[in-house]
Image (cartoon, helix red, strand yellow):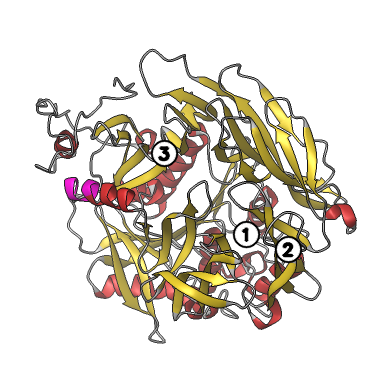
């Protein structure tokens, strides 16, 4: 077996450990050839260009035969959709571009030649802005792009329910055919030839059913209904073709009730595999008799304070391969014995790094593996169970390679009301952690949370000599429903206090110089930055808002979602009784510290006008403000040139307004 090397390859787990400077590990291949000691390259001072490099690949996915890797690859400083052969002697990589103003995501193979790609665009529809989603098929052999169901007149036409397992270019895809409430608003299901685009309808639309779920043979078995006016949800089920659907579960959104989440089908007729959460007390995977709602068996229970976010099943949709667990324990749990054994062997061989099986082929013999750390972007590897050898395909950052940059750890502190807050702390390497100039970096969302993942923003700021703390303030997800609800009514209030208390903790620990502290955040974090400078004007030395929200209203984060509009408005309405009272644009007069705003004109999540309006208000009031408007940047800065401009702007602004030296 000769695997292509997109960077220097490691020929065994033992060599892998050596490459990271970890010392010996147990090689998984007993006959692996001896590996020469790695060449130690002279360390150079890392700069913005090093951190701005796009990752080699995002969303990597393995073809059914395990010979091709699809993904969003960094080519010429931009992301491109590519299919790359993993073995010498294969055809050259095949790539296509991503249209402007379009987000590409959710790549999945139909067979060894065809790769489906989800595209999302935000566009004006009937005076509102809607997220419109469509599918394309990319044939790696011919390079042909086939638009699938693009003549649908609905908002969503890209939900892939099932793909054939016999090599045929066939998929079941759900698509809406109207944006107006009526029969065609609810999605139909089509059997589609992804190479030609031809299709036939296999499931007519059904009132209130927006999501469908099939078994492993492609038979539609589950329907999820929702009424946005009443906020009522329901689950309908049938045993097979020819039977009628029957309601098996109902939930009232106004009462915060949740539906069961079906992830597969059980070992006996009428049973299903479901994830069920009982508030903060219980999250487990069950096999349930859907007709009676009785538990037949408990398959796996999450630890206290954690919950099951996702389950992966085999193609039969009966065998659970693994689970993604969120909360206090964030990890992948493999229930398949062979995969669990392989994962354990990886972890043993590389104990000081995180080893994650990213994707597997259809018979579980080949896999893509990522090895990284909170302080290192890591690399992507290929592994064949028959060979027992890890081959490095490429570093995710060729500039940074596998080196550890700035140390990262989780810390906990008490907010002023006693609530325990978890935060990610990054400290500059080689600098004493004492009285550091400091940056508090709130995450976006706010229904999100920061984890011990490599974060190029935090690493770059730490590289400049600053301590960085990323608080998972109240209202963040990842810590259970009770913690998330503590943010309700507290937007701009206790949620903001939690950021101040993070700085206070760092000062008391002797880590931070409280007189040299700045706020830096993106999206909701940009809002929190601007609001912090207005609300606590004497606390912060400066602030940087990236793609931030200056004028808060219920529509800011739920635009483009017509079906769940009332549901989303409910969620935002619970965050504050008065949006105007906590909008930074209405409090410009209270701001004292310099503010930098960075925003891309291609942002389809937070409108560029949010920052432009804030800048105009600041300038009108004679406040210190700088604005970097990037004409082609999106919300996530997916172009390398935009990342570089962002990082250079951050560096220059911090050096001017809160110098580290």
Q: CA distance from mark 3 to mark 1?
A: 47 Å
- Please indicate whether residue 314 sits to the left or right of residue 104 in the image: left
Q: Is residue 646 above or below residue 488?
A: above
Q: What quarter of the picture does the N terminus occupy? A: top left
**Mark 2 lies on residue:** 555
Q: Position of residue 236 (x, y in %)?
A: 71, 66
Q: Position of residue 546 (x, y in %)?
A: 54, 51
Is tag 2's residue or tag 3's residue first in the polypeptide sequence?
3
- Please indicate whether residue 192 sits to the left or right of residue 421 in the image: right
Can residue 375 be seen in this snapshot?
Answer: no
- Residue at (83% x, 51% y) in the render: 204
Marking on residue 363:
3
Closer-to-camera residue (547/187): 187
Element class at badge 2 = loop
- Please indicate whether residue 573 sits to the left or right of residue 96 in the image: right
**Mark 1 lies on residue:** 549
Can residue 463 be seen in this snapshot?
Answer: yes
For the residues bearing labels 2 and 1, Cβ distance under 8 angstroms = no
Main secondary structure along the magenta-highlighted residues: helix
Q: Which residues are magenta?
A: 345-350
Element class at badge 1 = loop
- Please indicate whether residue 385 sits to the left or right of residue 197 in the image: left
Marking on residue 308:
none
């Amino acid at each position: 077996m000769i695997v292509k090397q997109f960077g220097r390859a490691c020929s065994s787990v033992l060599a892998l450990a050596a490459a990271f400077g970890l010392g010996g590990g147990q090689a998984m291949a007993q006959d692996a050839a001896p590996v020469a000691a790695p060449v130690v390259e002279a360390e150079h001072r890392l700069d913005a260009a090093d951190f701005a490099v796009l990752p080699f690949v995002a969303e990597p996915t393995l073809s059914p035969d395990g010979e091709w890797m699809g993904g969003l690859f960094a080519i010429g400083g931009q992301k491109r959709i590519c299919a790359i052969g993993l073995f010498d002697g294969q055809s050259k990589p095949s790539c296509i571009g991503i249209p402007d103003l379009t987000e590409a995501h959710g790549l999945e193979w139909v067979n060894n030649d065809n790769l489906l790609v989800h595209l999302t665009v935000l566009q004006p529809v009937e005076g509102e802005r809607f997220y419109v989603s469509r599918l394309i098929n990319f044939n790696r052999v011919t390079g042909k792009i086939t638009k699938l169901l693009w003549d649908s007149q609905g908002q969503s036409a890209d939900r892939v329910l099932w793909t054939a397992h016999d090599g045929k270019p066939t998929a079941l895809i759900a698509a809406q055919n109207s944006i107006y409430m009526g029969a065609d608003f609810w999605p139909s299901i089509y059997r589609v030839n992804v190479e030609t685009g031809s299709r036939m309808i296999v499931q007519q639309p059904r009132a209130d059913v927006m999501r469908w779920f099939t078994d492993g043979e492609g038979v539609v078995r589950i329907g999820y209904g929702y009424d946005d006016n009443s906020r009522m949800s329901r689950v309908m089920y049938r045993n097979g073709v020819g039977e009628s659907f029957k309601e098996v579960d109902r939930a009232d959104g106004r009462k915060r009730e949740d539906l069961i989440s079906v992830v597969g089908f059980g070992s006996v007729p009428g049973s299903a595999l479901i994830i069920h959460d009982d508030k903060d007390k219980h999250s487990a995977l069950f096999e349930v008799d859907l007709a009676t709602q009785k538990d037949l068996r408990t398959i796996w229970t999450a630890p206290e304070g954690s919950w099951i976010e996702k389950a992966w099943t085999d193609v039969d949709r009966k065998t659970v391969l693994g689970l993604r667990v969120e909360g206090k324990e964030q990890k992948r749990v493999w229930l398949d014995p062979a995969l669990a054994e392989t994962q354990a062997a990886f972890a043993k061989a590389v104990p000081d790094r995180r080893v994650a099986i990213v994707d597997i082929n259809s018979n579980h013999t080949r896999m893509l593996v990522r090895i990284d750390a909170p302080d290192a972007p890591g690399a992507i590897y290929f592994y064949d169970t028959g060979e027992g050898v890890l081959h490095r395909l490429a570093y995710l950052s060729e500039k940074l390679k596998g080196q550890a940059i700035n140390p990262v750890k989780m810390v906990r502190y008490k907010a002023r009301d006693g609530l325990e807050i978890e935060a990610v702390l990054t400290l500059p390497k080689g600098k004493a952690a004492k009285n550091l100039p400091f940056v508090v970096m709130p995450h976006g969302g706010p229904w999100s949370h920061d984890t011990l993942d490599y974060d190029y923003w935090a690493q770059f700021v730490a590289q400049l000599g600053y301590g960085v703390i990323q608080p998972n303030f109240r209202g963040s997800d990842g810590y259970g429903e009770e913690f998330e609800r503590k943010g309700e009514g507290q937007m701009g209030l206790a949620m903001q206090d939690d950021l101040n208390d993070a700085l206070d903790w760092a000062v008391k620990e002797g880590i931070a110089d409280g007189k040299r502290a700045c706020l830096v955040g993106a999206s909701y974090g940009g809002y929190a930055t601007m609001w912090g400078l207005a609300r606590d004007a004497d606390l912060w030395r400066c602030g940087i808002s990236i793609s931030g929200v200056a004028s808060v209203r219920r529509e800011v984060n739920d635009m483009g979602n017509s079906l769940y509009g009332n549901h989303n408005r409910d969620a935002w309405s619970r965050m504050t009784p008065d949006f105007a009272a906590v909008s930074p644009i209405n409090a410009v007069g209270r701001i004292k510290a310099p503010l930098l705003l960075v925003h891309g004109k291609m942002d389809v999540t937070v409108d560029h006008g949010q920052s432009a309006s804030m800048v105009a208000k600041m300038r009108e009031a004679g406040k210190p403000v700088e604005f970097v408007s990037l004409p082609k940047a999106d919300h996530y800065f997916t172009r390398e040139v935009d990342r570089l401009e962002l990082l250079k702007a951050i560096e220059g602004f911090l050096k001017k307004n809160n110098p580290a030296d």
